[in-house]
């Protein structure tokens, strides 16, 4: 019978490194290099522990084995290429600079106002950008013709000459 068919049993003898004595009580050995389920279990442990140093060490260890290890958080990509991860159960935010990096824990309550303000400002910029795109894309705003005596009657886009776009870009660079 293979180990996968046996269920829970005493497969390993565990000794305390400092005392050399056998550990009493039940222990469960995880081997994440060989077992994807062990990687998942360790990542959940890293999320649940209050020991931030241990959590970071587990993340480093698992990502050294599997750089594409996933977490259960919602992932929100940011414009600068980084990601914000939200663990919905305990309202903990994480920030990571790339898929291969270790997420840094952030106390959600201490920064939520800043996040909401930045989100509101981003929505405002997106709205202005959408409005400008709709203006430039509108066929009606691009109609122009030549009147009598070689008179050019410019379209609304020609009259604007890119002013809407420049205004939005200028506002974006000042934030």
Image (cartoon, helix red, strand yellow):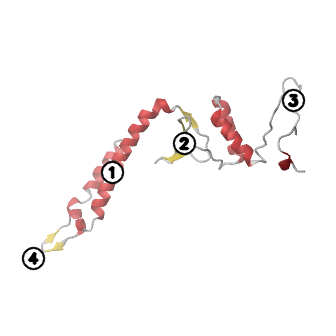
Labels 4 and 2: the sequence-earlier one: 2
The CA distance from mark 4 to mark 2 is: 62 Å
The CA distance from mark 2 to mark 3 is: 38 Å
Rendered view: 3 above or below 148: above
Rendered view: 21 above or below 145: above
Count of marks overlaid on the render: 4
x and y percent of residue 56 in the render? 65, 35
Q: Are marks 4 and 2 in contact (CB under 8 Å)?
A: no
Q: Are marks 1 and 3 in contact (CB under 8 Å)?
A: no
Labels 2 and 3: the sequence-earlier one: 3
x and y percent of residue 6 in the render? 86, 46
Say the numbered circle drawn on residue 148. 4
Residue occupying image coordinates x 61% and y 40%: 102
Label 3 belongs to which residue? 15
Circle 1: element type: helix
Quarter of the figure with the C terminus: top left
Label 1 belongs to which residue? 127
Say the numbered circle drawn on residue 85. 2
The CA distance from mark 1 to mark 2 is: 25 Å
Any part of residue 139 in sight: yes
Q: Are marks 4 and 3 in contact (CB under 8 Å)?
A: no
């Amino acid at each position: 019978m293979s180990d996968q068919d046996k269920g829970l049993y005493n497969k390993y003898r565990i000794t305390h490194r400092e005392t050399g004595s056998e550990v009493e009580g039940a222990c469960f050995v995880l081997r994440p290099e060989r077992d994807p389920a062990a990687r998942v279990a360790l990542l959940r442990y890293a999320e649940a522990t209050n020991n931030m140093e241990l959590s970071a060490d587990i993340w480093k260890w698992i990502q050294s084995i599997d750089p594409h290890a996933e977490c259960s958080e919602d992932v929100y990509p940011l414009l600068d290429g980084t990601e914000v991860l939200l663990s919905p159960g305990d309202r903990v935010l994480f920030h990571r600079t790339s898929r291969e990096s270790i997420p840094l824990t952030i106390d959600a309550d201490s920064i939520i106002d800043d996040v909401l303000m930045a989100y509101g400002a981003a929505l405002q910029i997106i709205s202005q950008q959408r409005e400008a795109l709709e203006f430039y894309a509108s066929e009606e705003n691009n109609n122009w013709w030549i009147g009598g005596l070689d008179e050019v009657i410019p379209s609304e886009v020609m009259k604007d000459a890119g002013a809407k776009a420049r205004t939005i870009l200028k506002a974006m660079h000042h934030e």
